Every structure is written in C-alpha cells, then in structure tokens.
Amino acid sequence: MKIAVYGASGHVGTFAVRELRERGIDTVVVGRDAARLAGFDTEIRVAAADDHAALVAAFGDVDAVISTLPDYTGTGEGVLRAAIAAGAHYVDVAGEQLFVRKVFDEYGPLAEAAGVTLATATTEAGIFGDLLAHVGAARLGGADEIVLSHVALPGGEGSRGSMRTVLRNLDVFAGGGLSWSEDRFQTGPTPRRGEFLLPDATEPIAVRKFPQPSVVTIPRHTRAASVEGVLAESIFEVIGTITEADLAAAPETPSAPAAYSMVVDIRHDGQLLRGIGSGPDAYRNSAQLAVEVAARIVAGAGTPGAQSPAELFEPVDFLDALARFGMSWTLA
C-alpha cells in the first residue's frame, strides 16, 4: 500500500504523514515547495496544485491521495482531478460545503468511470455529523429534522489554514450556505430554529445557519425532512472582523490542541436523540481520520465514485474504531 499526502508540510498534513509512518504505510509527500518538504524522512515529489501533468506524474504509482490543503475552494480541484486521472483513490479534509457538493455532483461520475473512490469532508465534523445522523435516524425510525453544530472547547487555538478558509468563504458563511428541505438543497441565512442548547448548558444560545459539510452528505443515505447546520451567533461576529493582516499574523501551527464536540440533534415524531462526537484535537483527528479512511478504501472498502462516510462504512463499527484516536461518541 502506497499513499501520497498533498500539502504534507501544513499542520494537518504533518499529522497525516506521521500517522501513515506509524502504521508502516509506504508514504509519498507531495507539494509545490521542495524546501518545505525536505524535513520528511520519506519520498518527496514536487508538483504545484495547478500543474496537472506534474500532479498526475506524482500520483501515478500510489494507491490513494490524501489532500490536506488549507483552501479547497481556491485550489482543491487540481489535486482531485489529478488523482482521478492517475487512477488513485482520493480523500480530503475539506470543510467547504460547496466544494464538497462539487465533489459529488461533478467529480463523482468521473471517479466512477475511472474505477476510483472519492471520500470528501473526512474531518471530525464531516465524519461525526454524517454517521451520528445516520445512526440516530435509524434508531428513531426516521428523521423530521436534523441539526448539526460544531462546538470548539475552551483553550484551543485555530490554524492559519482555518483562517484562510474563513476569509475565502465569508460570503458563503454569511449567507448560511445550503440546507436540505422539500427533497432538495435550499439557500438562505435563517435557520429553522434560532436557538440551540449546547452540551451541559442550561439555557440555549442564539444561533445562525452555518454551511456544515454533512448537510451535503446526509441526504444521500438518510431520508430527512430537514437537515441544516448552525453555529453560535457570537462566532459570526468574530468571523466578520477577520482581515488579511490577521491571516498573516495567525500561527501556522497552533500552540494548543483544538478540542471539540460535534453535536447532532435528530428529531422524529416528537422524540429527540442527541449525538455527540468529541475528540482532543480537530486537526490531528482529521488527519487520523483521513488516513483511516484512505487505508480502508485501499483495502477494499467502498465502490467507485464519490461516497459519504455512511455509504463507505458500517457506521457503528467505524465510530467505535475511533477510540484509538482518543475520539468518543454518544447517542441518547
């Protein structure tokens, strides 16, 4: 098994390479800057994200590509397109909802024809959101409403890559992105519910609609009348003040782990199940998830085309397997 990591010198990419090496998987690091890759004790290949020929050559003999770019909206398609052309399976840690939808709508058919599998939004939010929604709806016998919210726990710190994603997608964030209702994707900034009760809280907080990537994947396998993401209104006030100067000053490598909880509320016939997936560090866990998913796909999981987590794996089995990464889940 040979797996390439594109963007290996970034924060998440470094964790992905470390996880691959600890598993004894033959690893290739790929990026546009040879100097930034020089510190890796593994094979190095140089290719810019917009150089199709160089990327295809770099991916030509690998079984899978893990893309750990900080900004998929601007540069993600080049790596994705090249992986398909090279006949390599593809996994990414994208959080941008519109990019995730494009993977399914535009690149899924191309991957199916090429005989490769695409797994996008392989992050703590994407994995927990998708799988907990699936398991919860199955236990309730259906879903009238699914609401997802990512909660960053106190003490953590974001990376420069995360801030870059925010800056490049401010319009989408402000507009609320996509939600699912009436059997189709809808747009608009207003959530169905303007309040959300955080774990262990006694009073709900004000929230706004937010483009969670799982909104795109959940309707592929779970019939639900409504699916939407929300985020604390106070976070939007901070997001709206971020500037290019803030981006330049942000740490490329955070000084503290970004602990989190992904909360998924599933309602059906007056009943509520709340799923919570938690972990010690969103960045490290996303890298570990990407490696886990890529290794399983190379070993035979999934079918050609773009697939959501619940389509690739048996949800409870996969969720339970995440304990090795310090990740846990509940549904009650």
Image (cartoon, helix red, strand yellow):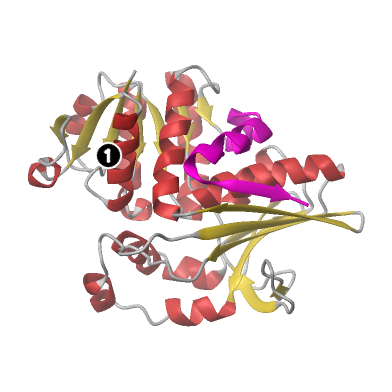
Residue behind mark 1: 6
Is residue 93 visible in the rendered image? The answer is: no
Q: Residues within 10 Å of mark 1 (few under 14, many from 20)?
A: many
Indicate the quadrant containing the N terminus: top left, top right, bottom left or bottom right: top left
Image point 60% across, 44% down: which residue? 217
Relative side of 96 to 329, left or right:
left
Is residue 195 visible in the rendered image? The answer is: yes
Which SS class for mark 1? strand
On whether residue 325 falls in the magenta region, the answer is: yes
Image point 63% across, 35% down: which residue? 310
Relative side of 131 to 106, left or right:
right
Where are the magenta residues, as a range?
309-332
| Residue 123 spot, x, y in % from top left | 48, 47
User: Disc 1 residue type?
Assistant: Tyr
Which secondary structure class fits the magenta region best?
helix
| Residue 171 spot, x, y in % from top left | 45, 70
Look at the picture and state if 222 lies above or below 54. below
